[in-house]
Image (spheres, grey):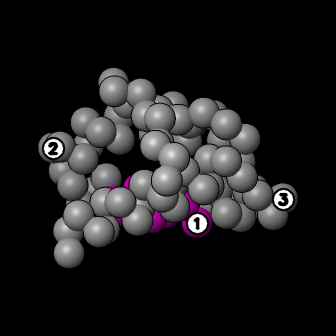
Amino acid sequence: MKPININEDCKFLKDLQSNQKMAMYNLIATKGAVKLYTKGIKPYRGWRITDVKKYFGMNGNAEVLHSKLVKLYDVLTEKEK
């Protein structure tokens, strides 16, 4: 399995430490929004892929970003079990 490259100073990791429920909610909601974006649908007005990249500290196009978010979700939920 390829490691996920995340910027250490990203907002997601800070939220994960301070308010884990909000961080997980953001991950789940963003995962669905990026999936829509890969199909050519903008989730809502004002939504930008750049904001997602900045919040999660990741880079890549929409497909790569979606696969990274899914892998991140899988890693975090396996840890809770």
Tell me, yes or no, if residue 47 can be seen here: no
Q: Residue 26: which quarter of the image?
A: bottom left
| Measured Cα–Cα span from mark 3 to mark 1 | 13 Å
Q: In this view, does 31 lie above or below 51?
A: below
Mark sitting earlier along the chain (2/3)? 2
The magenta segment is 24-32
Kind of residue sitting beneath label 1: Gly
Residue found at x 25% / y 36%: 14
Residue found at x 49% / y 53%: 1
Mark sitting earlier along the chain (3/1)? 1
Residue labelled with disc 3: 40
Q: In which quarter of the image is the C terminus?
A: bottom left
Mark sitting earlier along the chain (1/2)? 2
Residue 9, percent across and down?
Answer: 33, 24
Res 18 label = 2
Residue labelled with disc 1: 32
Horizontal side of residue 31 vs 12, given as left or right: right
Residue 15, percent across and down?
Answer: 26, 43
**Element marked by disc 2:** helix
Residue found at x 53% / y 35%: 58
| Measured Cα–Cα span from mark 2 to mark 3 | 34 Å
